[in-house]
Each structure stands twice: as structure tokens, then as C-alpha cells.
Image (cartoon, helix red, strand yellow):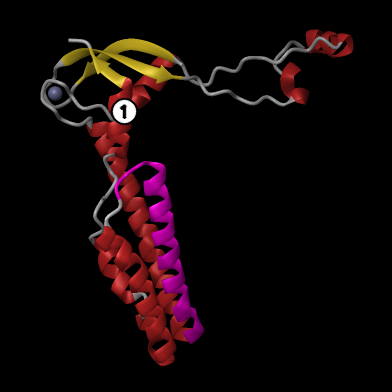
Amino acid sequence: MAAVTLTYACEACAAETTVRVSGLKIPDVPVNKKNRVFFLPPDEAKRQIEAGTAQPIAVKTKSMEELAREVLRFATCPQCSTRNPLGVAQQRGLVLKSRMSGLALLAVCVAGAWYFPTFGFATPILALGFTLLNIYTRRLRRLPLDRTLVFIGFAGPLALAAFARAYPNLAWLVPLPLLGPELVRPQAGRDFEWKAAAEQVRFLD
Ligand SMILES: [Zn+2]
């Protein structure tokens, strides 16, 4: 783990602050045995292979400063408390992406259940899977669990499955209640990146 000191320029208040970013580690790049000599001049490579002295080479993918800048994407300005617009935009992009794929998935579920009523069970199974995944990731990140949301996360899919069983002809309606939460999904846990960055970032003036 290494640390690097650089300047953070806030886009909101234009303040330039000296900042120390710690906990940095240049990721290891696995280079397979065969390719170790790939980057050497051919004669030298041949010589090393024959002598059995071919060594692994260090491939630098990113500099310390580049790594630090990535952490600073989620920095909060110490002068005006504004979040780095780069991080805000990055999160917004991810949210939009996941929302689009969520809506596409729901559309597939509606179409599937329209033609094959049994497909109506796909939505509750998916929803239950997401509930379990959500609980798992929140535990992993040591975030508190909202009991009401957990209850809805289990009761909702069960109710939908019961509906799909009772009214096979209307099974295509089953995914629709999920449309609401998908559109106005609260961005719970969106603070994670900012908190993680705050632990690595120390403003010096
Ligand atoms: Zn600022």
C-alpha cells in the first residue's frame, strides 16, 4: 500500500487543496509464463529461454497518480462540501444503466408470461433473488438492513407467485407492480463510494 500527495481542484468553488491519498496499490498484471519474454528483443528472448533465465516482467498499467485520481473522483471538497462532479456523473450513468436493464428485464417477463403463463413465476423468482442478493451485499458492506424493505422483499414475491398461480391467464400482469420501484428506485447505498474514498483521502490544508 502506498500514498501519494497531489492537488484537488474543486469545480464548484475553484479551491485547490493539497490532498494525500493513501491505501493505493498498483494492481498486479498476470503475465503468463510463455509470454514473459514477449517484450524482449527476439535474440535476447531466445537466449534467455535457452538458458532458462527468462524472468517475469513488470507491467505497469497505471501510475500512482492515476490511481489516486480515481479515488479522488469520489472526493468531497473540504472548502464547500461539494461532491466531485466526476463521481456524481459516474454514479448517475451507472444508475441509468441499471434502470434500463431492469426495465428491459421486466419487459421480457411481461412478454414471456403473455405467451407462456408459467413464465409468470419468473418475476417473483427474480425478485426474491434480488432480495437475497441485496441482503448479502449489505451485510458484506456492513450497512444496516431496513426491516420493512426486507419484509416487502419476501412478501412481495410470494404474493406475486400466488397471483400467477391463481390467475394463469393474467400472469403477464405479475411484473407490472415492479415497474414502480424500478422507476423511483431509492438509491440506497449510493454513499458507499464516497465513504470508501473519504477513508483514503486526507486534505492537508
Ligand atoms: Zn469546493
From this view, report whether residue 116 is shown above or below residue 156.
below
- Residue sticking out furthest to the right: 50
Q: Is mark 1 within 8 Å of ligand 1?
A: no
Q: Residue at x 18, y 22 (%)?
A: 10
Q: Position of residue 63 (x, y in %)?
A: 46, 16
Give yes or no for residue 69 being in the magenta stretch.
no
- Location of the C terminus (image quadrant): top left
Quarter where residue 90 is shown:
top left
Q: Position of residue 50 (x, y in %)?
A: 89, 12
Q: Is residue 137 left or right of residue 43?
A: left
Q: Would residue 95 be visible to someone looking at this image?
A: yes
Magenta range is: 116-144
Q: Residue at x 14, y 17 (%)?
A: 15
Q: Position of residue 59 (x, y in %)?
A: 60, 18
Give yes or no for residue 134 being in the magenta stretch.
yes
Disc 1 residue type (three-letter): Ala
Q: Residue at x 34, y 46 (%)?
A: 94
Q: Would residue 116 be visible to someone looking at this image?
A: no
Q: Residue at x 31, y 50 (%)?
A: 95
